[in-house]
Image (cartoon, rainbow, N blue to C red):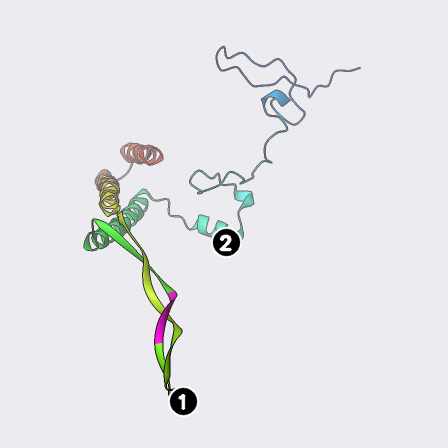
């Protein structure tokens, strides 16, 4: 039988010795079945997308609306810096409002009172005019009574501290974006500008 010219060895290599696998690759794949050929989800799938932070973008899979939004993205570094500054300024404001609201309602303890409507029976003396005698009758009435009181420590202080730490990080990123814009405007263009943009992209991917 003639040898299949399209048949090739698996391209996977060991991590320790970096030796290539000696098995035959599965048709249509670069690796053998032991190294993942035929397994997993189909190409271009989005099964693992949760937050969208690390989502891969495939142009042929985008909807017309997504393509329109994608085309509207301004790639100018200065405009990108402006958008970063606006975003961090908005986050800064929202976080400061939350901190203020927490501080205004700061209490060491929160009290929870549980009230229930219960039936209360009371004996009542009733006079019978015909017989001239009195008798005791039990009457029921509904009344709202406190059945449980619970006091718990509130996490306001911890929440404020966490927000203040996050606010500091946001303000630091905002300052870096402002410094970036100043550097871009002062250097004009050329190699120096490209270095600044690449350094900024590296810092963003690492945060």
* Residue hosting label 2: 65
Q: Can I make out residue 196 in this image?
A: yes
Image mark for residue 48 = none
Residue 83 is covered by the magenta coloring: no
Quarter holding residue 31: top right
User: Dominant secondary structure of the magenta stretch?
Assistant: strand
| C-alpha gap between disc 1 and disc 2 | 89 Å
Q: Which residue is more in the foreground, 105 or 182?
A: 105
Q: Which residue is more in the foreground, 99 or 32?
A: 99
Going from N to C along the chain, the mark reached first, 1 or 2, is 2
- Which residue is farthest bottom? 130
Quarter holding residue 149: bottom left
Q: Position of residue 46 (x, y in %)?
A: 53, 40
Q: Position of residue 80 (x, y in %)?
A: 32, 45
Q: Which residues are magenta?
A: 118-124
Q: Tell me the quadrant of the picture where the N terminus can be found.
A: top right
* Residue hosting label 1: 130
Q: Which residue is more in the foreground, 175 or 15?
A: 15
């Amino acid at each position: 039988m003639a040898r299949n010219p399209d048949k090739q060895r698996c391209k996977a290599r060991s991590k320790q010795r970096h030796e290539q696998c000696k098995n035959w690759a599965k048709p249509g794949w670069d690796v053998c079945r032991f190294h993942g050929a035929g397994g997993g989800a189909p190409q271009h799938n989005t099964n693992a997308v949760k937050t969208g932070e690390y989502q891969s973008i495939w142009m042929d899979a985008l909807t017309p609306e997504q393509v329109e939004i994608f085309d509207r993205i301004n790639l100018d570094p200065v405009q990108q810096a402006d958008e970063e500054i606006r975003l961090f300024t908005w986050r800064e404001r929202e976080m400061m409002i939350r901190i203020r609201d927490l501080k205004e309602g700061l209490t060491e303890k929160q009290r929870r009172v549980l009230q229930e409507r219960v039936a209360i029976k009371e004996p009542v003396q009733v006079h019978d005019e015909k017989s001239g005698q009195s008798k005791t009758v039990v009457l029921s009435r509904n009344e709202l009574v406190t059945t449980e009181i619970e006091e718990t420590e509130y996490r306001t202080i911890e929440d404020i501290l966490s927000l203040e730490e996050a606010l500091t990080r946001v303000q630091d990123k905002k300052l870096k974006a402002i410094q970036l814009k100043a550097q871009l405007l002062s250097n004009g263009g050329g190699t120096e500008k490209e270095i600044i943009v690449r350094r900024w992209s590296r810092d963003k991917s690492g945060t």
